[in-house]
Amino acid sequence: MSKIAVRKHHLLTGHRDSIYALVQGNTTKEVFSAGSDGFVVKWDLKDTENGFLIARFPNSVYGIYFIKGTNRLIVGQNYAGVHLIDLENNKEITSASITQSAIFDVQLYEETLFVGCGDGTLSVLNVNNLTTNIHIKFSEKSIRCIAINPILRELAVGYSDCFIRILDLSTLALKHEILAHQNSVFSLIYSPDYQYLLSGSRDAHLKVWAVNNNYSLTESIVAHLFTINHIAYHPTLPYFATCSKDKSIKLWDAQQFKLLKVIDKARHAGHSTSVNKLLWVDSLLLACSDDKSISIWDINGLA
């Protein structure tokens, strides 16, 4: 553990309430955030003193998605719908009122947008005009997270009924139904080689599923004290990070699934409340929290 050095690079402030979403833009210096205050903010990591307000919504925003290679941002507004924002002019191109529930996640594959809703509905839209292709529902409980496997053309969906459901990416047919956790599944991510699916839950367990062995369970780790809110792989190295309601961030070896480092308030002046989302930008690890701030950590010693 001692070989990994963690230095607090900066703290971004300006949001007025809990922050739930972090995504990277077209460059490694451009980041977007959103949260309970309804603010969507653009940050320049080379000039961290001020954020730029992109849009403001009357309800919380949990899910945002930047469309790479464009200058467009998708925003999921709770109790209203999905918005497509032109960042060059800071104007809304179009919107779709698809739900009266919360929107917990938005993910994109090619031109198809997948929206996970609080009433258990998976809404599938055309990203260019936000017209609805289909609404599909396998549970009355919330969809909390979505992950996409383009190799096997599968869609992994995490629900508050403790299940992970694996769907065919094209037909949306149900392929696997996994009773994965003892509480809501809050985070899903495929490993970069798509050999594993990692899940994090409100039960504080991190679980590893072997994709090519019918999603059999290979690891079950009591990773945190409370809810695991998010899991994020390093963009180039075999490591990943988890964050939790227990206020900590943990760094893991992605090959052996061993804990390498704990980042918390006592040891590294970390967050004082729940850490909700993570984002790797090169060697920097960004984390947003209920404490209304975004911390930027410089992580050295990973190789």
Image: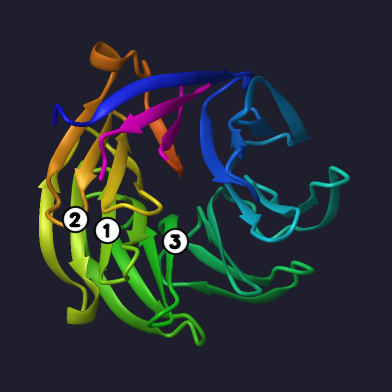
On residue 146, the disc is: 3
Residue 4 against residue 30 in the figure, above or below: above
In the foreground, 78 or 75: 75
Can residue 267 be found in the magenta stretch? Answer: no
**At numbered mark 3, what does the secondary structure look like: helix, strand or loop?**
strand
The reply, left or right, for residue 274 in relation to residue 50 is: left
Amino acid type assigned to the residue bearing label 2 in the image? Lys
- Gap in Å between the C-alphas at discs 1 and 3? 12 Å
Pinpoint residue 7: horizontal percent, then vertical percent: 35, 21
Disc marking residue 207 = 2
Q: Would you name the residue on which mark 1 appears?
A: 198
> Along the line of sight, which residue is nearer the eye, 44 or 95?
44
> Dots 3 and 2: beta carbons under 8 Å?
no
Of marks 1 and 3, which one's residue comes earlier in the chain?
A: 3
Q: Where does the image place residue 103, in percent across and percent down from the top left? A: 56, 51
Instruction: Judge whether 20 appears above or below 175 on screen.
Output: above
Q: Earlier in the sequence, mark 3 or mark 2?
A: 3
291 relative to 191, above or below: above
Q: Amino acid at mark 3?
A: Ile
> Which contiguous range is marked in magenta?
283-303
- For the point 30% across and 41% down, the residue is 242
Picture quarter with the C terminus: top left
Q: Could you give the CA–CA distance between mark 2 and mark 1, rounded to whole angstroms?
A: 6 Å
How busy is the neighbourhood of tag 3: few (under 14 within 10 Å), some, or many (20 plus)?
A: many
Residue 142 placement: quadrant: bottom left
Please name the predominant secondary structure of the magenta segment in the image. strand
Tag 2 near tag 1, CB within 8 Å: yes
Residue 247 visible in rendering: no
Q: Residues within 10 Å of mark 2 (few under 14, many from 20)?
A: many
